[in-house]
């Protein structure tokens, strides 16, 4: 990057808010996906949308790529600055701006850590439902840009369902405000939803109005274990057929159960082929009724064992153990390739069985866990980047797994985003027409292609 | 329209599926808004997406506007073919294609009447929550194109929250399939949500995958009456502050109460200045608890009277009476101008008081009813199109009301759409940058500007 460009940016944000050291640039060349790395030329932490407008002007004039980055916990290469240029940090735009208890909204800057949101409103009787696995470190801006999911999606939906409005600096320097503190708003195109999940390719989000919900009074957790994946999937179907919508319905296969138990020591049944971890929340009496019904359904199905957590603390312990799945698996081998195949709920067994067959075929070590209620599975391959032959087999295996996912009516990413990792598979889901439509919108809103280029399209 | 174009269209759909008679063209020049009329040149009822692809090809080659129309029950001029050309009907694309009880989805063609959806799945224990006032006659395609709301939005959301995927014929003839039977899907831009509410300007919807929900076991209804609007609005705030989310929380002012009672004879308190009609659904015990709490809140507030419906039938009768509000008001004078001002819930009293002041200032007869829980108010002016002087005052009054709505953090349309009616006010909500972004997307996806031109942008 030319020195004059660096100086122009420095003049906007101040010398203390740019980073140019080799070690910094190396670090910001990564996100949480293991396979992608490309260094930026400059790392910049602006303090306001006005500074971002000025930075974008410099980027436009000099065709400098700019990649917005939260905590870099995304799993798709989405924030890897593959074309170089600027990585934009929100470490100085991390304030909670307003808590409106009458309209049940929280207005935040993008750099707020997701978990802080629920900590901030903890005493209000309200909560913010989206709970991506990364929430302890990820930013809300990153969650919005990736449309992050989580464990509660079946009942509560994902990030997109809790964003009422956005302030966005567009590539041309326009600042737009979409939506508002409104339950209903049909004035113009739904740019709020177009921006959510667009992975920083259509604009830079500088503010968000989040929707809060009354916090459920209580919750209860249960575990059901199975001899086969198919039996576990049948219980999922049977529970849905009984018109129960649990808050969480997680699936772990034997590889994952063992890794988690070894890591968290919460007494998981390591001999089971599959396990469901189910939580319901709401009014205490209704929870009891739902848990009882679900326990009966699992027992009537082929569950080997059904256990209801002793109390909320025990339930929380089990859920926390589930949240360690990725870390637990990651300990097994040097490299963890975490995937995000998502199918209609009815096809979970077909998908997981195919994953297991494919792992066997390519002699790979794959653990699968995920959100059974959403059909959102995370087959996780434990491997070693340095083993080129094995990595080749990993790529072949996942290409086949995603092909199968599409055949089953699924999608190539449920909650991790396209980034670089899913780019090769994206046309399988969108088709040529869908790719053309996406590209036309990108070209219309970012004609100079400065916003996170070489991604998504 | 040149005869050769009509012949080209006739060759695609057959002579029996085009209409060119003067009376037909006159009729299809209207929607349910009183102030807009423009005749199309041709009315066409295709049988399939393939026919629509061919029709669009003719439209592109000859720069013929094409306006997709459900039942024409929309209230914004959105389906009035203001630039002439073709009105596209879905009377032959009105099949329910698949009911998937495992994934809780219903796949439909756009011409299905909204109410038929719930009739079709009545015995399944599932339901489709969106319930726009027009649902007995409106089509699901129209609802999707307008992102229709309804009475249950506070708890259940609006149409956009129940569309999982779409099949759309784009202006260039591409057929795209967005989303799927998926709870989570972040592959590419959210074209599903971009299409919803785009009022037929970005593509022709030919299929939709709808999300169904377990049907609540029971419901209970109550009425609270007030001496002032402010008192009623306070109860709304207090109920929300108590962390209760009722299924429905409707507001009627005195003008509307009188008109409805005169029409429906259900025993509404015609001397009250304002009335809340509240319904909760769910597990019977929890409903009782919620209704009890809400009744106490209303009584502790300044409610003159609180009545709980005797049973579900009585509750249904009250809700049905509320649904007659528009028809009841429409009987009073020859012309009904129904508006759709929406504010943050906390600003309802400010908005309704301003509406009343404005009505007085301009000597207009305005009744206001609407969805208090959503801040979505329908000030309805009873007037006479033939009285030019009064119509001028009507327009002045509503311009001021929408200006106030924007000042209060609201939007110029909550659920009726922009169409032609809200076009003058749209920039107030979107700003210059928002308008530019919307127009750029329109130009990118419909470069020949054939899809419902002269609307929305």
Image: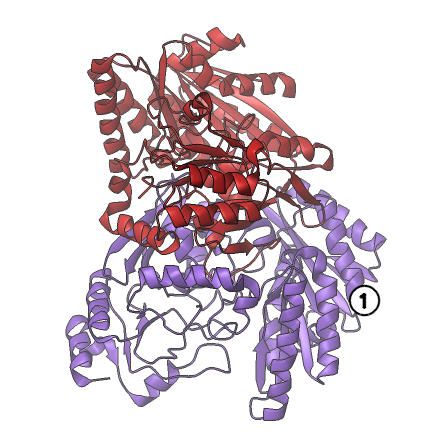
Chain colours: A purple, B red
Q: Is residue A375 left or right of residue A227?
A: left
Which percent across, then down, holds residue B150?
Answer: 49, 31
The answer to whether residue A260 is seen in the rendering is no
Q: Is residue A64 left or right of residue A227?
A: left
For label 1, the SS is loop
Res B2 → quadrant: top left
Does A67 sit above or below residue A181?
below
Q: How many labels does the image show?
A: 1
The C terminus of chain A lies in which quarter of the figure? Answer: bottom left
Which percent across, then down, holds residue A174?
Answer: 24, 57
Q: Between residue B354 and residue B235, name the one nearer to us.
A: B354
The N terminus of chain A lies in which quarter of the figure? Answer: bottom left
Question: Dot 1 surroundings within 10 Å: few (below 14), some, or many (20 or more)?
Answer: some
Does B294 sit above or below residue B142?
above
Which percent across, then down, holds residue A422?
Answer: 52, 72
Q: Which residue is drawn at 40% across and 44% down?
A: B451
Q: Return the chain for callout 1.
A: A
The answer to whether residue B324 is seen in the rendering is yes
Badge 1 is on which residue?
A228
Which percent across, then down, holds residue B79?
Answer: 41, 33
Q: Which residue is drawn at 40% across and 49% down?
A: B60
Does A160 sit above or below residue B35?
below
Q: Between residue B29 and residue B423, name the one nearer to us.
A: B29
Res A452 → quadrant: bottom left
Q: Between residue A325 and residue B253, name the one nearer to us.
A: B253
């Amino acid at each position: 990057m030319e020195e004059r460009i660096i100086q122009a940016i420095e003049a906007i944000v101040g010398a203390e808010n740019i980073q140019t050291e080799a070690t910094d640039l190396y670090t910001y060349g990564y996100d949480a996906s293991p396979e992608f790395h490309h260094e930026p030329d400059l790392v910049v932490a602006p303090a306001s949308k006005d500074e971002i407008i000025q930075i974008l002007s410099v980027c436009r004039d000099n065709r400098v790529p700019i990649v917005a980055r939260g905590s870099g916990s995304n799993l798709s290469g989405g924030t890897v600055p593959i074309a170089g240029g600027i990585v934009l940090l929100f470490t100085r735009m991390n304030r909670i701006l307003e808590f409106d208890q009458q309209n049940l909204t929280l207005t935040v800057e993008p750099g707020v850590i997701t978990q802080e949101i629920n900590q901030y409103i903890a005493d209000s009787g309200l909560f913010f439902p989206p709970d991506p696995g990364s929430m302890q470190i990820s930013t809300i801006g990153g969650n919005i840009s990736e449309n992050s999911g989580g464990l509660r999606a079946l009942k509560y939906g994902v990030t997109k369902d809790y964003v009422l409005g956005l302030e966005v600096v567009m590539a041309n320097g326009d600042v737009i405000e979409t939506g508002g503190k409104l339950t209903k708003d049909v004035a113009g195109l739904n740019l709020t939803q177009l921006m959510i999940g667009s992975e920083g390719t259509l604009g830079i989000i500088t503010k968000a109005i989040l929707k809060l919900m009354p916090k459920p009074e209580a919750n209860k957790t249960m575990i059901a274990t199975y001899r086969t994946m198919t039996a576990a999937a049948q219980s999922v179907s049977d529970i849905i057929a009984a018109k129960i919508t649990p808050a969480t319905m997680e699936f772990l296969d034997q590889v994952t159960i063992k890794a988690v138990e070894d890591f968290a020591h919460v007494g998981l049944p390591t001999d089971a082929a599959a396990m469901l971890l189910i939580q319901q929340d709401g009014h205490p009496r209704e929870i009891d009724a739902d848990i009882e019904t679900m326990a009966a359904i699992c027992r009537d199905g082929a569950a080997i064992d059904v256990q209801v957590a002793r109390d909320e603390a025990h339930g929380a312990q089990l859920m926390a153990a589930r949240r360690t799945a990725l870390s637990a698996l990651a300990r097994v081998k040097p490299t963890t390739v975490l995937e995000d195949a998502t199918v209609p709920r009815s096809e979970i067994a077909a998908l997981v069985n195919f994953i297991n067959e494919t792992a066997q075929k390519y002699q790979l070590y794959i653990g699968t866990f995920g959100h059974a209620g959403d059909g959102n599975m995370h087959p996780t391959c434990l491997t070693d980047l340095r083993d080129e032959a094995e990595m080749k087999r990993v790529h072949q295996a996942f290409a086949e797994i995603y092909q199968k996912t599409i055949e089953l009516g699924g999608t190539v990413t449920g909650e991790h985003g396209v980034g670089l990792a899913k780019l090769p598979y994206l046309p399988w889901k969108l088709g040529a027409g869908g790719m053309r439509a996406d590209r036309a919108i990108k070209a219309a809103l970012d004609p100079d292609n400065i916003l996170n280029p070489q991604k998504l399209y």
